Image (spheres, helix red, strand yellow):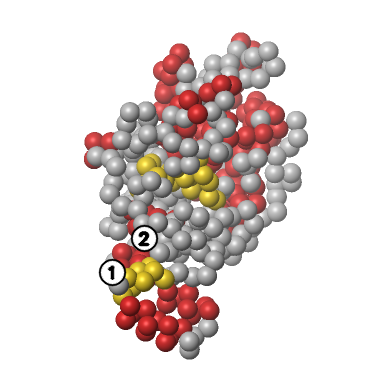
Amino acid sequence: MLTTLRLPLLQRQSAAPSARIFTTAQRRTLSISSCCYRPQSLVASASHSSNSLLHHRLAQRDVSQAKQLILPLGFRNMSSTRDVSKQSDISKSTMENDGSFKRLASTFRSTIEKGGQLEPEAGRYHLYVSYACPWAHRTLITRELKGLHDIIGLSVVSPRMGNHGWPFANVDAFPGADADPVNNAEHIKDIYLKVEPQYTGRFTVPVLFDKKTGTIVNNESSEILRIFNTAFNDMIPEEKAAIDLYPEALRAEIEASHEWVYPTVNNGVYRSGFASSQGAYEEAVKALFESLDRIEKIFESQQKNNANSKGEYFLIGNHLTESDIRLYTTIVRFDPVYHGHFKCNYRTIRDGYPLIHKWMQNLYWNYPEFKETTNFDHIKTHYYWSHSHINPTRVVPLGPIPNIRPL
């Protein structure tokens, strides 16, 4: 007879199959946009005899020791036979031979659509994110813009990413972090290893999880953004369904902008900050500021020729698109983190790029979906605390003051 063991206060979860719902052909590598490394889950089964032995031991140990005995049982079977620290510990990441940073492609690339293998259903899917991660932030903003709060569940990890990757609140009770109500995981890596015990990729966020099948639907932020943009339109209010972040008429321009904004700006700040050679750093930081100069000129043209009735201007067209969301999550982190921590210090956004700055301010102050998902405590703590190979003291700076200037 199998006995299920759990820590007190952890909700019981029904067992779910771990079969993948996608084929190799679905693992496309168009854009590589998910954050860092992640966690593990907590349901453990043992035989009756093992259970008796555990109870005997627990009688002689305190609660902390009991946690160590009970929690990892199921997951030790999956992961303890091999070392996954290079997948979870950012300080153990390796660079290219020339000292440059190369982001790996996301692995889980299924979609949600009517008539597909994964149907849109309210309450079926759960989104795991970090407020700190710019890639996960994309999906948070889109979830808010489309009004998916009651349809897609949400759990936020702690920003302090340590040896085991992104932790949940039951491991690191950082303000604003959540426990995992779906898988009872301690770390994001637990979820990956529960779904695929031999998983070899990074334990990244965002993660879109299917509670019905117990699988990861997708961990590529750009694709989750588009899933949220259309998949649930029949289930949300008409005004929310009408919001189209990837309109047909602008798709060619949007895709063209992604071709250079992603490698030089979104990932460019990481290529600058994680470079381990002078040459790799200089190549990345020069490309970054060339692209920021280019964006400033685009905004100059947009402000003159394509502003909407409110005087707002956007990267593509005259209304908000996914291009603005993808750029915002990098720009809003630039002065608080990337300028200093990643040595992207030609100039700041607030003092060096007036039109980029005004565009960012407008999104933050006039669109609640942007402001309410931008958590500067999580952002600054994550980078300065988690990247101990860059900031060994883990001291988190107080500035800039303010984090974002008022309009």
- Horizontally, residue 199 falls left or right of residue 152, namely left
Farthest-out residue, top: 305
Residue 120 visible somewhere in the drawing: yes
What's the residue at 55%, 39% (across, down)? Answer: 150
Residue 193 position by quadrant:
bottom left
Q: Is residue 359 above or below residue 336?
A: above
- Residue 231 drawn at (x, y percent): 43, 29
Q: Which residue is mark 1?
A: 81
| Disc 2 secondary structure class | helix
Tally of numbered discs: 2
Farthest residue to the front: give it.
1
At a point 65% along the width and 52% down the height, the residue shown is: 377
Considering only order in the chain, which callout, 2 or 1, is on the residue closer to the N terminus?
Answer: 1
Q: CA distance from mark 1 to mark 2?
A: 14 Å
Q: Is residue 188 above or below residue 305?
A: below
Residue under the image location 70 percent in, 44 percent down: 403
Give amino acid for label 1.
Thr
Q: Would you say 128 lies left or right of 15 here?
A: right
- Which of pointers 1 and 2 indicates the residue nearer the eye? 1
Q: Position of residue 225 (x, y in %)?
A: 47, 33
**Residue under numbered circle 2:** 86
